[in-house]
Amino acid sequence: MAISLQDQLLKAGIASKKQANQAKAEKRKKKGKKTSSDQQSGAQAQLKADKKANDQQLNLVREQQKALKANLSQARQIIESNRVEIPRKSEIKHQFSHLKFVKTILIDKGIQAQLFRGQLTIVFMDEKYWLIPTLQAHRLHALQSEWVVELPKKEVLEEDDPYADYEIPDDLMW
């Protein structure tokens, strides 16, 4: 078995035991520093990457919340600026279904005619029902679709409908 250089130097008397121990300690320190510095730089890079990914996720969530808040605000503004006032002395009951329940609002003849022609649409906001023009209801539907009770369906008139020229009598109410 070969004797190490350190042992040979000790036997020859060129180096003392104290110097040999110091050399071993320095060698261990250098090796430990190199390994720990590599580990630290790798850990720091991983922390930076994790922080960056976390920040991107937070920014995405904030942007989504901001967009939802803007849509909600715009939807409220559409209803508040375009709502049709229903006269207090309205006596005609208009029934419609919303959330699997039949609801009733009191309207007058003019509003009833506009509802039947599809010019007005019923919307639901803040636990109340409002009437707004159908064009605005389409805009609202794009922002908050659950607020629109039901958009009027476009009726396709048959060209050969024999009753198209006749009006529906006023006393024929459902």
Image (spheres, rainbow, N blue to C red):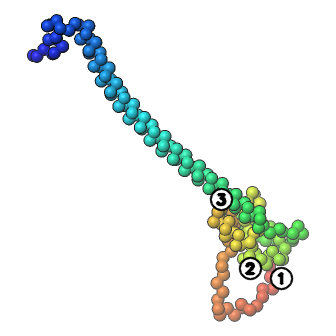
- The reply, left or right, for residue 83 in relation to residue 146 is right
Residue, x 67% and y 68% (percent of image)? 139
Q: Picture coordinates of residue 7 (x, y %)?
A: 16, 11
Q: Does the rendering let one see residue 172?
A: yes
Q: Choose top left, top right, bottom left or bottom right for residue 152.
A: bottom right
Any mark on residue 71, and which? Answer: 3
Any mark on residue 117, and which? Answer: 2
Which of marks 1 and 2 precedes in the sequence? 2
- The reply, left or right, for residue 151 in relation to residue 26 is right
In this rendered view, identify the residue nearer to me: 63 or 163: 63
Q: Which residue is mark 1?
A: 171
The residue under label 2 is which amino acid type? Arg
Say what secondary structure mark 3 lies in. Answer: helix
Q: Choose top left, top right, bottom left or bottom right for residue 123.
A: bottom right
Q: Residue furthest left?
A: 1
Residue, x 28% and y 19% (percent of image)? 27
Q: CA distance from mark 2 to mark 1?
A: 18 Å
- The reply, left or right, for residue 60 in relation to residue 86 is left
Q: Nearer the viewer, mark 1 or mark 3?
A: 3
Q: Picture coordinates of residue 39 (x, y %)?
A: 36, 31
